[in-house]
Image (cartoon, rainbow, N blue to C red):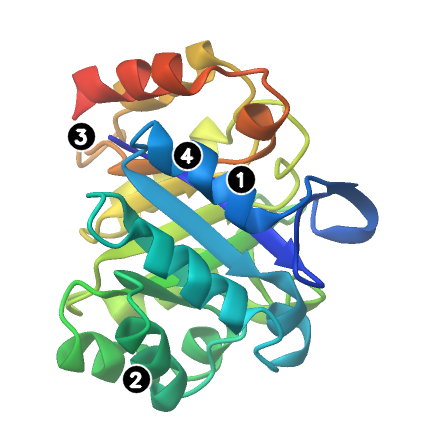
Amino acid sequence: MELLAAIDLVGGGAVRLVQGDFDRQSDYGDPLEVARGYLERRVPWLHLVDLDAARTGEPANRPVVAAVAALARGTGVRVQAGGGVRTAADVDELLSAGVDRVVLGTAALEDPSFAVDCARRHPGAVAVGLDYRRQGDGALVAAARGWLASSGRTVVEVLGDLEGAALGAVVVTAIERDGTLTGPDLDGLAGVLDATSLPVVASGGVSSVRDLRVLGALRSPSAGRGVDGVVVGRALLDGRVDLEEAMAACAPSG
């Protein structure tokens, strides 16, 4: 299980939101300084999200993403980036800037064939972000447009459209857990692991090294699969989780 340290971007700064709510924002300063701290300690991945672009589709923070990718070049640290990636040109631009894996969100939900085609052109270098809310009946419904709208489709339905694509990962975020430090949605993740053979990266709610160990040990009921990676944001930024301890906790399961 690989660790992905999250840096979310709003207005050129590093931030964290609670449950995707822009009115519940914590600021963490210069994202390049945050990235340098992670790079110096050789985190396996940086996970960058342009939250402004996720809402509007306009690549407001793409120069910051490119600058972080330039910092990471030659360090062995890989960069995953998403938010507002709507076209093949967006994918090409980010990959050309040095991003190792590009995350598609709304565009993949609205047109899964677009994601399949991008993955065909860039095998392993494209991921799909599935950010969900749990409905009253237990169904996991994917959100779009920076979590401001429902896609009207369940995560399982979307995964069915993507099965067999040359995707590097599906990044699965429990919106109700994101930024809350209340622990990951283990039941939701187990269901996702049973629903697809694609690599799964878990996101949302990690608050402790214990959460990482539990995630590393998680196996789905039917397929017996585990997660391939975990995104950690606020817990690292707030110092609740030590980076070295986090990487050590992830390593045994990988």
Where 161 sits versus 210, above or below?
Answer: below
**Which is more N-terminal, label 3 or label 1?**
1
Tell me the SS state at disc 2.
Answer: helix
Tag 2 residue: 113
Q: Is residue 43 left or right of residue 35?
A: left
Amino acid at pointer 1: Val
Name the quadrant containing residue 57. bottom right
Q: Disc 4 and disc 1: Cα gap in Å?
A: 7 Å
**Badge 2: few (under 14), some or many (20 or more) residues near its Cα, within 10 Å?**
some
Counting from the top left corner in percent of width and height, residue 56 is at 67, 79
The residues bearing labels 4 and 3 have C-alpha atoms spaced at a distance of 32 Å
**Viewer-nearest of discs 1 and 2:** 1
Measure how far apart labels 2 and 3 are at the Cα level.
Answer: 28 Å
The label number, if any, that marks residue 38 in the structure image: 4
Q: CA distance from mark 1 to mark 3?
A: 36 Å
Q: Which residue is mark 1?
A: 34
Looking at this view, is 76 or 202 the one in front?
76
**Amino acid carrying mark 2 in the image:** Ser
Name the front one of labels 4 and 3: 4
